[in-house]
Image: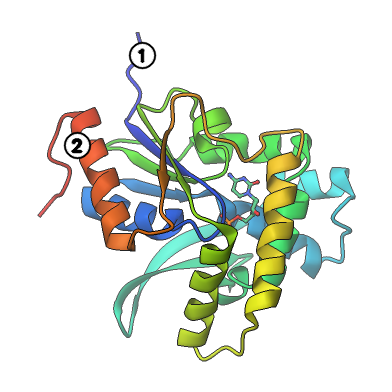
Amino acid sequence: MEIKPPVLTIDGPGGSGKGTVGQRLAWKFGWEFLDSGALYRLVGLSATNKSIAFDDVEAITKLALHLDAQFAVREGVHGAESITLLEDQDVTAVLRTESCASAASQVAQYQMVRDALLERQRAFRVEPGLVADGRDMGTTVFPDAQLKVFLTASAEIRAERRFKQLKGKGVDANLAAILADICARDERDKNRSVSPLIPADDAIIIDTSDLSVDDVELRVLNLAESTFQQELIAE
Ligand code: DC
């Protein structure tokens, strides 16, 4: 039987902390990190740049199949930082905007678009292992993952986290508008017919509403060490 590299999937809604926790653990383990949301955001951004309507499924699928994107690490003022390039342009900051998130959620509704990104996502599964962050990592992309975690938090808490994050960056934010965006995106992600946002049957669900990022990281780290039966923190 083929032995595939280990995968830890972390799924959940936006603002549940999955991106931060996933990235930190991948870094600590020395594993690959897949930010699958970034791929959908890149498709949404590319469609916007090329004035392609989000419901033009054929054109969006073509974009997804031929997406010219790169994930790289560069030395920033605070040390190493990940950057994302779309057709050689640095789109790291614009990718994090609410309009990109909304575009991503709209193009992500279509089976053809999702299928177009499937192999690209699976290609991240290499030795010594992969931490994959998204909505359907445990259900569709890596159904055979050895450890599946699903993070949740109330919409209000997630909106507050986002609000603080934006304020911290000096961005003028409105809590009520952020909450409305989060609820709209949740509805669309949960209710779509293909790969909806639901935990895999064998996922471990952690409600992060009353936990700090450090607490969540520690819990997932403990789960990973017992599942993969190894010390994962490379000093
Ligand atoms: O994780 P994120 O906020 O970057 O994701 C942006 C959108 O992309 C999200 O609202 C739905 C979509 N998405 C998806 O459908 N499947 C994934 N695996 C990841 C993201």
Find residue 68 and report its horizontal and vertical position in percent.
63, 56
Disc 1, SS: loop
Looking at the figure, which quarter contains the C terminus?
bottom left
In this rendering, does residue 152 appear at all?
Answer: yes
Horizontal side of residue 171 vs 16, given as left or right: right
Q: Residue at x 32, y 18 (%)?
A: 3
Q: Read off the residue under disc 2.
A: 225
Looking at the figure, which quarter contains the N terminus?
top left
Residue toward you, 212 or 7 = 212
Find residue 133 and report its horizontal and vertical position in percent.
47, 47
Q: Disc 2, ligand 1: is the CB inside 8 Å?
A: no
Q: Residue at x 52, y 72 (%)?
A: 160
Q: Cβ–Cβ below 8 Å for labels 1 and 2?
A: no
Horizontal side of residue 46 vs 91, given as left or right: right
- Relative vertical location of residue 195 with respect to residue 75 in this rendering, above or below: above
Q: Read off the residue under disc 1.
A: 2
Residue toward you, 162 or 47 = 162
Amino acid type, callout 1: Glu
Amino acid type, callout 2: Glu
Residue 97, image quadrant: bottom right
Residue toward you, 195 or 187 = 187
Q: Residue at x 22, y 54 (%)?
A: 28
Residue toward you, 104 or 200 = 200
Find residue 4 and report its horizontal and vertical position in percent.
35, 23
Check the image and name the residue furthest to the top.
1
Disc 2, SS: helix
Q: Earlier in the sequence, mark 1 or mark 2?
A: 1
C-alpha separation, residue under disc 1 versus residue under disc 2: 22 Å
